[in-house]
């Protein structure tokens, strides 16, 4: 990945974006700019919140996933104080998406999959791909959080 300086829009979204290099091949802030009509169609068809797409802080996302400096820190001190919990990252993503679907923010997986019998899946697939998620947007995974 090539490195480049943070744009002023990223600086507005994050106070520390200007302090280092940002290396993103794909900029979520640019991608999200024209996706509102696609998201609205999905929400109309599958009962999601049309406002959810605008709630993303895309500049911050670009900064968070594109930093060229490490942000991994030790959790040794936390463990010394008894925090020994563990959560499976992938399982927690599924749990988070399920929570958003249950709250009506995202369309439910059940609503999306309900269209398979009448060819509805084929009709929604380009919309999902238009959002950049591919088939993974409707797959289900077991939550293995402990």
Image: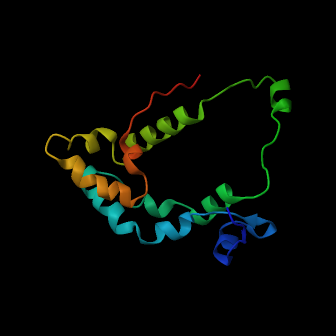
Q: Name above or below for residue 24 compared with residue 110.
A: below
Which quadrant holds residue 85?
top right
Visual colour scheme: rainbow
**Could you tell me which residue is drawn at 69 percent across and 63 percent down?**
23
Q: Quadrant of the N terminus?
A: bottom right
Q: Report the residue that reaches farthest toward the left.
A: 118
Which quadrant holds residue 27?
bottom right
Please provide percent x and percent y for residue 19.
Answer: 81, 67
Q: Is residue 13 visible?
A: yes
**Could you tell me which residue is drawn at 32 percent across and 62 percent down?**
40
**Could you tell me which residue is drawn at 78 percent across and 49 percent down?**
71
**Could you tell me which residue is drawn at 50 percent across and 60 percent down?**
55
Q: Quadrant of the C terminus?
A: top right
Q: Report the residue that reaches farthest toward the bottom.
A: 8
Residues 61 and 116: in front is: 116
In the rendered view, does 28 fall on the left or right side of 85? left
Residues 79 and 24: in front is: 24
Please provide percent x and percent y for residue 8.
Answer: 68, 77
In the rendered view, does 124 fall on the left or right side of 86? left
In the rendered view, does 21 fall on the left or right side of 135? right
Q: Name above or below for residue 54 compared with residue 96.
A: below
Numbered circles on residues, count: 0
Residues 16 and 102: in front is: 16
Which quadrant holds residue 138?
top left
Q: Is residue 105 visible?
A: no
Please provide percent x and percent y for residue 137.
Answer: 40, 46
């Amino acid at each position: 990945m090539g490195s480049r300086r943070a744009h002023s829009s990223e600086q507005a979204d994050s106070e520390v974006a200007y302090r280092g290099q940002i290396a993103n091949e794909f900029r979520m802030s640019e991608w999200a700019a024209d996706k509102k009509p696609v998201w609205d169609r999905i929400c109309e068809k599958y009962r999601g919140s049309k406002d959810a797409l605008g709630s993303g802080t895309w500049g911050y996302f670009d900064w968070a996933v594109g930093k060229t400096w490490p942000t991994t820190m030790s959790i040794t001190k936390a463990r010394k104080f008894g925090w020994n919990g563990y959560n499976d990252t992938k399982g927690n993503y599924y749990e988070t998406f399920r929570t958003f679907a249950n709250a009506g923010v995202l369309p439910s997986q059940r609503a999306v999959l309900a269209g398979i019998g009448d060819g509805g899946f084929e009709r929604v697939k380009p919309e999902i791909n238009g959002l950049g998620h591919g088939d993974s947007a409707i797959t289900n995974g077991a939550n293995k959080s402990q």
